[in-house]
Image (cartoon, rainbow, N blue to C red):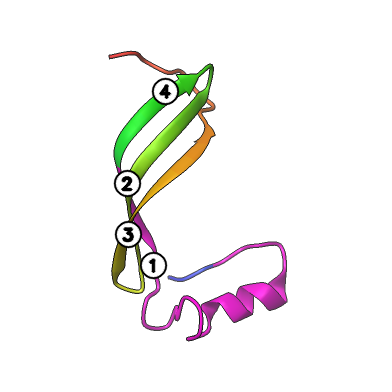
Amino acid sequence: SSSVDTSNSLRDSHLKRSDFFNSKIYPQIHFEGTKFIKLKDHQLLVQGIITIKGIKQKIEVRGQFKGPILDS
């Protein structure tokens, strides 16, 4: 099922409409991580492919890991 939660119900409704995510036709956004890079401490960079409305795009996302990091 499709859901969006930005803590603003009016914005959430708008994001589901056809001029944005079109959640009736595309109820899911899919992300597949292809590479995880430890930067420092619990900081990491995730590279991958995101699919929105059937369109695939390579992206990079920076974030924090909240659990143990194992070096390979």
Above/below status of 56 relative to 69: below
Q: Residue at x 51, y 18 (%)?
A: 40
Whether residue 30 sits left or right of residue 18 in the image: it is left
Q: CA distance from mark 3 to mark 4?
A: 22 Å
User: Which amino acid type is marked by label 4?
Assistant: Lys
In the rendering, at what x and y percent does residue 17 appear? 53, 84
Around disc 3, counting alpha carbons within 10 Å, would you say few (fewer than 14), some (14 to 19), or many (20 or more)?
Answer: few
- Residue 57, compared with residue 52, is above or below; it is above
In which quadrant is the C terminus drawn? top left
In the rendered image, which residue does mark 1 sit on?
28
> Is 39 drawn above or below residue 58 in the view shown?
above
Q: Is the residue marked by circle 4 packed among few (<14), some (14-19), or many (20+) residues within 10 Å?
A: some
Give the mark nearer the N terminus: 4 vs 1.
Answer: 1
Q: x, y (%) of residue 31?
A: 35, 53
Looking at the rendered image, the disc whose residue lies closer to the viewer, 1 or 2, is: 2
Q: Residue furthest bottom?
A: 18
The residue to which callout 3 is attached is 57
